[in-house]
């Protein structure tokens, strides 16, 4: 078996999962379709409200990942970046706050920085991902 071909196929599968996960979470959260006029207008809301909406979106994506037995690492990191507590993440994962922190704390500490303002969070998240609307959920 050619490992390179398998790696390419795995990356393609992660992209498909990410796109469908984002679409499903958008439907649950009532988010507009990416690129639509409503979506563009939503990007102009105050930073605090935008961060809050993105935090909730990532928490929904975590819950979907758990139900589908798909790794939620990217969404756990992003939920923390947008200010989710370990209790909120634990609730989305279906585990205690402590269990969530024990499982994901080191990953999040390595992958995120503590920022002083919500505007800095949004800027950092924009740099961390090409788009906050498609998160692969497969790769840290």
Image (cartoon, rainbow, N blue to C red):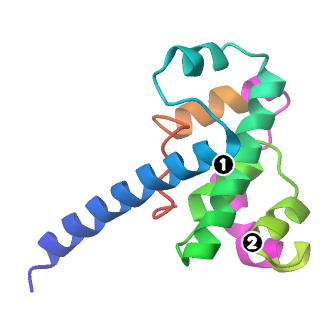
Q: Residue at x 66, y 19 (%)?
A: 42
Residue 112 appears in view: no
Q: Quadrant of residue 63?
A: bottom right
Residue 133, image x, y percentages: 53, 38
Answer above or below: position of 95 versus 13: below
SS at mark 2? Answer: helix
| C-alpha distance separating marks 1 and 2 | 17 Å
Mark before the other along the chain sequence, 1 or 2 = 1
Mark identifier at residue 18: none
Residue 88 appears in view: yes
Residue in front for this viewpoint, 13 or 76: 13
Q: Residue at x 73, y 77 (%)?
A: 103
User: Label 2, on which residue?
Assistant: 93
SS at mark 1? Answer: helix
Mark nearer the viewer, 1 or 2:
1
Answer above or below: position of 46 versus 79: above
Q: Residues within 10 Å of mark 2 (few under 14, many from 20)?
A: many
Report if residue 28 lies within the magenta region.
no
Residue 83, image x, y percentages: 82, 45
Give the main secondary structure, helix, strand or loop, of the magenta stretch.
Answer: helix
**Apparent side of residue 83 relative to residue 130 in the rendered image (left or right):** right
Please provide the residue range marked out in magenta. 100-120
User: Label 1, on which residue?
Assistant: 28
């Amino acid at each position: 078996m050619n490992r390179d071909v398998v790696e390419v196929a795995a990356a393609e599968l992660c992209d498909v999962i990410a796109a469908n996960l984002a679409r499903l979470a958008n439907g649950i959260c009532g988010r507009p379709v990416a690129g639509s006029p409503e979506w563009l207008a939503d990007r102009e809301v105050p930073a605090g409200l935008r961060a809050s909406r993105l935090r909730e979106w990532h928490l929904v994506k975590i819950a979907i990942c758990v139900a589908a037995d798909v790794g939620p690492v990217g969404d756990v990191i992003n939920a923390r970046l947008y200010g989710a507590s370990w209790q909120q993440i634990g609730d989305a994962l279906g585990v205690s706050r402590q269990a969530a922190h024990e499982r994901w704390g080191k990953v999040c500490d390595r992958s995120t920085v503590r920022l002083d303002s919500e505007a800095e969070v949004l800027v950092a998240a924009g740099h961390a991902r090409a788009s906050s609307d498609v998160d692969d959920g497969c790769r840290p």
